[in-house]
Amino acid sequence: MPTITAFESSPDRGRGQARDMRVRWALEEVGQSYDVRLVSFAAMKQPAHRALHPFGQIPTYEDGDLTLFESGAIVLHIAERHDGLLPKDANARSRTIAWMFAALSTVEPPIVELGMAMLFERDRSWYAERLPSLQERVRTRLGELPRHISNADWLDGAFSAADLMMVTVLRRLNTSGLLDEYPDIAAYVARGEVRPAFGRAFEAQLAVFNAASHSG
Ligand code: GTB
């Protein structure tokens, strides 16, 4: 049974925004049970955790003699070893992997930049001036997505690891208000969130937050 790592106390307060959520969701989609080792921010930077993750972050994934870091690599690994998250056809499989990369390297960066500014830079003198350009970079990507998802349930045929990745990336906009401007994208995210496997993953990470807040 694989073991993943997650925040002992997630700063998102149980909203399922940390990147263990996409790994949990992938494992739930394929029906693979898993263990979770919770790590504190301090423990993440210690040698024992850095031996698993060079950047001292979560999530990690351990299964037998394999250790992985990077949520994209972990989800791809899970998708390659189980049915249900990657198409069998070789070209469709490559297109799905391309969309996974697109989610992580084209869509996620401006969303993370905006999120970081909203979380950590609100009290800076230049925040109000910078915010519109951060929002505009996100809008550019959101404006380019709907033709791929408005006429179909998922990015390329059946639900896949690409949708799992894209939905978790887009969910990070939940508190920004930007998704309200793109009803097709909001509907796509909602389609992901109602999947039973998403629900199980969400509840599992929420249970960690609830346990931590009751114990403290
Ligand atoms: N590229 C890596 C991956 O995809 O796995 C990025 C991993 C990463 O950023 N991990 C974060 C981490 O360990 C947690 S998910 N941070 C601790 C550190 O770097 O010291 C990022 C995250 C954190 C908090 C929220 N939130 O509060 O809403 C959302 C997302």
Image (cartoon, rainbow, N blue to C red):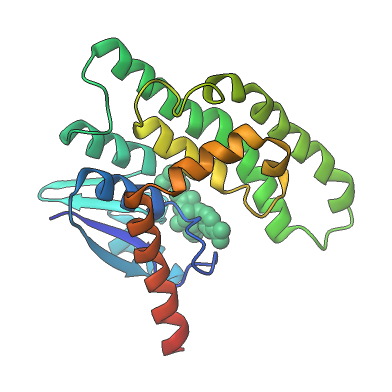
Whether residue 53 can be seen here: no
Task: Specify the quadrant that holds the N terminus.
Answer: bottom left
Residue appearing at x 23%, y 33% in the figure: 84
* 116 lies left or right of 86: right
Percent across and percent down for residue 44 are 39, 64
| Residue drawn at (81%, 37%) of the image | 133
How many marks overall? 0
Q: Position of residue 175 (x, y in %)?
A: 66, 55
Check the image and name the residue furthest to the top: 91
* Residue 199 higher or lower than 91, as above or below: below
In the image shown, does 203 or 123 lie closer to the viewer? 203
Please tell me in which quadrant of the rendered image residue 181 appears: top right
* Outermost left residue: 64
Q: In this view, does 212 lie above or below 71?
A: below
Q: Nearer the viewer, residue 152 or 108?
A: 152
Q: Is residue 193 left or right of residue 31?
A: right
Q: Where is residue 149 in the image (x, y as percent from the top left)?
A: 53, 25
Q: Residue 125: x and y, percent?
A: 89, 57
- Residue 32 can be seen in this image: yes
Residue 9, picture quadrant: bottom left
Q: In this view, does 205 lie above or below 182?
A: below
Looking at the image, residue 84 sits to the left or right of residue 170; the answer is left
